Amino acid sequence: MEDQIGALGLVLNALVLFNTQFMDAAVNQLRADGFDVRDEDLARLSPFVRHHINMLGRYSFQLPELSGELRPLRDKDATDDE
C-alpha cells in the first residue's frame, strides 16, 4: 500500500511540474503577444489541473464514419501547403 501511495505522489508531482511549465509558457506567450495578463489573475491559477490526464487506464476512441474506400494518393509534385 505504501508503494502505491509513493507512486501516486510521484505521478502527482510530475503532473504539477508539467502543468506549471506549460502554464508558464502559455502566460509568457500571451504577454509576448500583447495581452494584459494581471498578476492577481495569475495568483488564482492552480497547476493541480488533471482533467487532461486519464488515471483510470480506460480509453475511448471515436472512429469516424469510413466509406471503405482508400483516400486519394498525394500528388508527388504538390507542396505541403496544398
Image: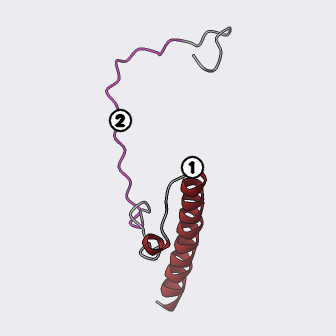
Residue 61 position, x and y percent, is 37, 44
- Look at the image and give the residue range highlighted in magenta: 55-72
Q: Which residue is mark 2?
A: 63
Helix, strand or loop at mark 1: loop
Q: How is the image coloured?
A: secondary structure
Residue in the foreground of this view, choosing between 30 and 71: 30
- The residue located at (63%, 20%) in the rendering is 80
Decide if residue 22 is on the left or right side of residue 71: right
Is residue 29 placed above or below 43 in the rendered structure? Answer: above
Identify the mark at residue 20; answer none if there is no mark. Answer: none
Left or right of residue 52, residue 65 in this image: left
* Residue 67 falls inside the magenta stretch: yes
Q: Residue at x 55, y 78 (%)?
A: 13
Front-lying residue, 60 or 27: 27
Tell me the residue that label 1 is attached to: 33
Give the amino acid at mark 1: Asp
Please identify the quarter of the rendering in which residue 50 is found.
Answer: bottom left
Q: Residue at x 56, y 12 (%)?
A: 73
Q: Residues within 10 Å of mark 2 (few under 14, many from 20)?
A: few
Nearer-N-terminus badge (2/1): 1
**In the rendered view of the protein, which quadrant contains the C terminus?**
top right
Image position of 72 with respect to 44: above or below: above
Residue 38 percent across, percent down from the top left: 48, 68
Which element is circle 2 on? Answer: loop
Say if the magenta span includes residue 51. no
